[in-house]
Amino acid sequence: MDVNIVLDTNTVLYFLAGRLAEPMPSACFYISVITEIELLSYPLLKIEEEQAINDFLKDVTIVDLNESIKKSAIHFRRHYKLKLPDALIVATAYCLHADLLTQDIKLLNIKELVVKPLILFDS
């Protein structure tokens, strides 16, 4: 498994909801600490949803912020006019030399890294 993939928050939510039309590729999976915070801080989160998230988090590597990610996030936020959480997630993928898996259309335009869209079941 030489492929590294950073999962955007929406990717994790779609995965947990069983909405991905294709299985996750074989890879080493990472999430930004920002994704962890976003997943666990939803105000209406039910106990069983929180447990599913915590179980999922045991199977991925959570990447904390560091100086390289902070500097890269500044670049991506300025250059692409991203919201801060998105810039930090993109910067995490960039600094890990990883692909980014997302459903966020704005992130699909990032030129400095490989960004792959999700294929979802119709809702």
Image: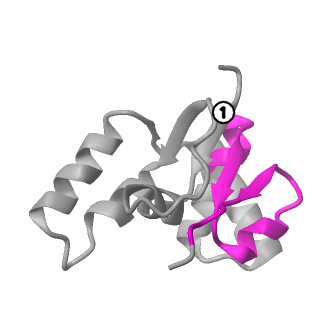
| Residue 82: percent from left, percent from top | 68, 76
Q: Nearer the viewer, residue 48 or 91?
A: 48
Taking the spot 57% from the left edge, 44% from the top edge, the residue there is: 23
- Classify residue 50 as left or right of residue 29: left
Q: Is residue 98 found inside the magenta-colored segment of the image?
A: yes
Q: Nearer the viewer, residue 123 or 89?
A: 123
Q: Is residue 47 above or below residue 30?
A: below
| Residue 11: percent from left, percent from top | 53, 59
Give the residue furthest to the left. Answer: 47
Give the residue furthest to the top. Answer: 1
Taking the spot 65% from the left edge, 61% from the top edge, the residue there is: 118
Does the rendering let one see residue 94? yes
Q: Nearer the viewer, residue 110 or 69?
A: 110
Taking the spot 42% from the left edge, 50% from the top edge, the residue there is: 33
- Classify residue 60 as left or right of residue 74: left
- Classify residue 64 as left or right of residue 84: left
Q: Mark 1: which amino acid?
A: Asn
Region of the chain picked out in magenta, as a range: 92-121
| Residue 79: percent from left, percent from top | 82, 72
Taking the spot 66% from the left edge, 43% from the top edge, the residue there is: 68
Mark 1, secondary structure of its residue: strand
Q: Mark 1 — residue?
A: 4
Q: Quadrant of the N terminus?
A: top right
How are the colours assigned in the image?
A: one colour
Q: Is residue 38 above or below residue 12?
A: below
